[in-house]
Image (cartoon, helix red, strand yellow):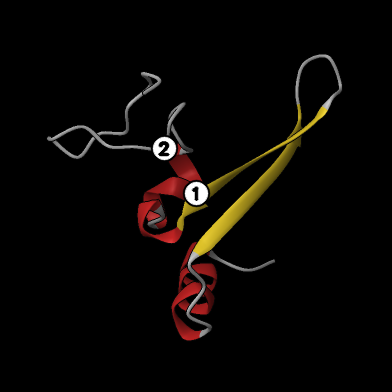
Amino acid sequence: MKTAKDVLKTLKDQEIKYVDLRFTDPRGKWQHVTFDVTIFDEDTFSEGLGFDGSRSPDGERSMNPT
């Protein structure tokens, strides 16, 4: 299994611009959402993403939809 640092290095080395997350919702329907790679850091792998993936001015991830 790769570490967060390994994944972040791959994103940078391969100049990846977007990350598409795929999952099933509580009803079992297949969903996906695409995020700009700039929102990912080591904390993303332990804390997860907020609803809209953004951060507040103090650096905390937002749970509010835009």
Residue 12 as seen in the image, left or right of residue 58: right
Q: Nearer the viewer, residue 46 or 37?
A: 37
Mark 2 lies on a secondary structure that is loop
| Label 2 Cα neighbours within 10 Å, binned few <14 / some 14-19 / many ≥20 | some
Mark 1 lies on a secondary structure that is strand
Q: Residue 4 at what x, y percent from top left?
A: 50, 62
Q: Would you name the residue on which mark 2 appears?
A: 53
Residue that appears at 41% across and 37% down: 53
Give the amino acid at mark 1. Phe
Whether 16 is drawn above or below 41: the answer is below
Q: Which mark is residue 8?
A: none
Asked whether the residues under the numbered discs 1 and 2 touch, taking CB atoms below 8 Å apart as contact, a structural biologist would say: yes
Give the amino acid at mark 2. Gly
Q: Residue 26 at what x, y percent from top left?
A: 77, 16
The first of marks 1 and 2 along the sequence is 1
Whether 59 is drawn above or below 13: the answer is above
Q: Which mark is residue 35?
A: 1
* Quadrant for the C terminus in the image: top left
Whether 39 is drawn above or below 3: the answer is above
Residue that appears at 27% across and 37% down: 55
**Residue projecting furthest to the left:** 58
Count of residue discs: 2
**Residue projecting furthest to the right:** 28
